[in-house]
Amino acid sequence: MTTGAVVWAVIGAAWLVLALAGATVPGVPSFVGVARAFLGSWAGRGIALAAWASAGWHLFCQRP
Amino acid sequence: MVAPSRTEYPPPRRGFVARTGPRVLGLVLILALIAWEGTLQRFSAPSRWSVGSVIGVTVILSALVGRGRQRTTSTGWARRAAAVVAGWRPRAVAGPPLTAVIGTVVWVALVAATIGWDLNSFVHEAHELPTLSRLFGGATDRMWGRALVFAAWVGLGGYLAVGARRRPHEQRDAFPGGAHTDREGPACSPGNRRRRVGQ
């Protein structure tokens, strides 16, 4: 396993732990809570949709 | 003979096929699109057309479904975000509970770590330092990987387009996502009218 893969595995595990904590521990911001904060207005929704669209285009249409 | 009222309440119940048919048809179409997308190559024209079409349809759907149903205005949202950032204090000085402070700090640290390590890998361009998109690229090179990631992307787009909308009986709020929304709704809302009738 390369250095980069190890670091990505650690970061991924940390995201997983944070997701679990957000879903179970009161007060910790959850993924849904953060998403809802963005989706409350057209500006936030526009930012989220633009990020989603560019990620999809990069992932499925360009060379990652 | 009295003509049926246009504002009849509750509205007449539709049949099973009329209620579920469009949803089933939509689901089948989306599944077919996902399966087809899995067979495409990254650089092909159909791939670009399909992804571009999904983006276009999602944006149009968001505009149609969300018209007048945002929880707050863009100005109010930006003000609120600026106030949260400007007014953020450690627990010793003001308000938020310790778990919220720690959770927020971990969130910020993880986002910074993800972006920072991705940038570091991108700058070095070394085989042992893959970027995030190269990792995903490895998965989307295979048919099932591409189909699964595409399904997740379409699902996320659907949520971003139509999720977290203000319900018709809810009032507009200056604080989206919080507990400040009038969940009961005004006295004339259909939900409250039903409750009153049932009492």
Image (spheres, coloured by chain):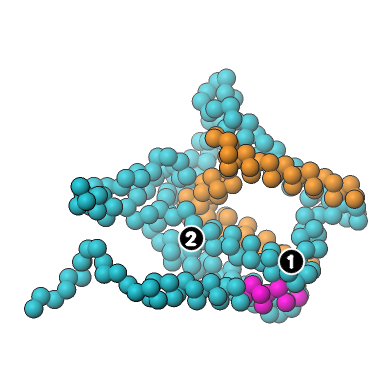
Splitting the image into 4 quarters, where does residue B16 fall? Answer: bottom left
Depth order, front residue of B81/A59: A59
Q: Position of residue B93 (x, y in %)?
A: 55, 20
Left or right: residue B57 versus residue A7 is left
Q: Which chain is orange?
A: A
Q: Position of residue B148 (x, y in %)?
A: 68, 65
Left or right: residue B150 versus residue B30 is right
Query: Looking at the picture, does residue A4 appear above or below residue B91?
Result: below
Chain B shade:
cyan
N-term-proximal mark, 2 vs 1: 1
Q: Residue at x 34, y 48 (%)?
A: B171
The answer, for residue B86, to whether it is visible in the render is no
Q: Residue at x 35, y 50 (%)?
A: B170
Any mark on residue B145, and which? 1
Part of the protein shown in magenta: B33-41
Q: Amino acid at mark 2?
A: Val
Q: Are marks 2 and 1 on the same chain?
A: yes
Q: Which residue is mark 2?
A: B162
Query: Looking at the picture, does residue B60 appear above or below residue B129?
Result: below
Quarter of the image that includes the C terminus of chain A: bottom right
Give SS at disc 1. Answer: helix
- Tell whether position B35 is magenta: yes
Q: Which residue appears farthest toward the top when viewing the image?
A: B92
Any mark on residue A60, and which? none
Q: Residue at x 90, y 50 (%)?
A: A2
- Estimate how packed mark 1 is, as few (under 14), some (14 to 19) or many (20 or more) residues with alpha carbons within 10 Å: some
- Tell whether position B176 is magenta: no
Left or right: residue B175 versus residue B188 is right
Using the image, name the chain to which the residue with label 2 belongs.
B
Q: Position of residue B14 (x, y in %)?
A: 32, 72
